Image: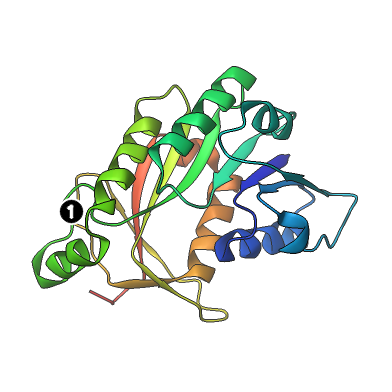
Amino acid sequence: MKILILGAAGQISKMVTELILTETDHDLVLYGRNLSSRISVKDPTREVIIEGDFNDQDKLKKALIGVDIAYLNDMSSPAVTQSIVKAMEDSGVNYLIGANVLGIYNEVAGAFGRWNANMVGSATHSYLAAAEALEQSSLDYVILRLTWLYNQKDNEDYDLTQKGEPFIGAQVTREAVARLIMTIIHEPVQYAKTSLGVSEPNTD
């Protein structure tokens, strides 16, 4: 299998890259701006770096050659998401996992929901539009609606909620998100066409 990491210099992207290299024999295409100065290749037989803009259709299609699953580390831009969707549909690559934020469907109740809405602010509309670009596409997508992130080695615990269910949980580790992405890569059919709220158990 070949996995494309879009935004490969992000923290979660780096964790996913490490897990793929250590736990699988999958190949990797690492895509993003100025990557050669931001990441290092550990296994040149399995990793390829392509430096490019997310709106560059030619570069994206080059990166998508032979790819089975893509992961997008940041869905804050509807235009970028639409560009990636177009490149994937044109290239016949059908599966995209995208990192989004909680609250785009007004699914977070109570004081925490009000605080989160205030913190994310008007950017919520962009995250929602990016999610809708995936939901309206022909792709088998997984949207990960992530609560507030932190790092904690070996803490890979997560809970999932479906679209239409109340979001529960105020935080989750990047390590847990990386583990979830690995689970989706291993079981893509089970998760296809879902929008998942991702949080740490017992943090509501």
Q: What residue do we see at 90% from left, 50% from top?
A: 45
Q: What amino acid type should be assigned to the residue bearing mark 1?
A: Glu
Compared to residue 200, the image places residue 29 above or below, namely above
Q: Residue 137 placed where, x, y %?
A: 41, 24
Quadrant, the C terminus:
bottom left
Q: What residue do we see at 27% from left, 69% from top?
A: 169
**Horizontal side, residue 56 vs residue 79: left or right:** right
Q: What residue do we see at 28% from left, 77% from top?
A: 203
Compared to residue 10, the image places residue 31 above or below, namely above
Judged from this view, the residue extending furthest toward the left is 110
Can I make out residue 192 in this image? no
User: Which residue does the numbered mark 1 point to in the structure image?
Assistant: 107
Where residue 17 sits, quadrant-wise, is bottom right
Judged from this view, the residue extending furthest toward the right is 45
The total of numbered circles placed on residues is 1
Q: Residue 66 placed where, x, y %?
A: 74, 29
Q: What residue do we see at 50% from left, 43% from top?
A: 97
Secondary element type, mark 1: loop
**Horizontal side, residue 15 vs residue 168: left or right:** right
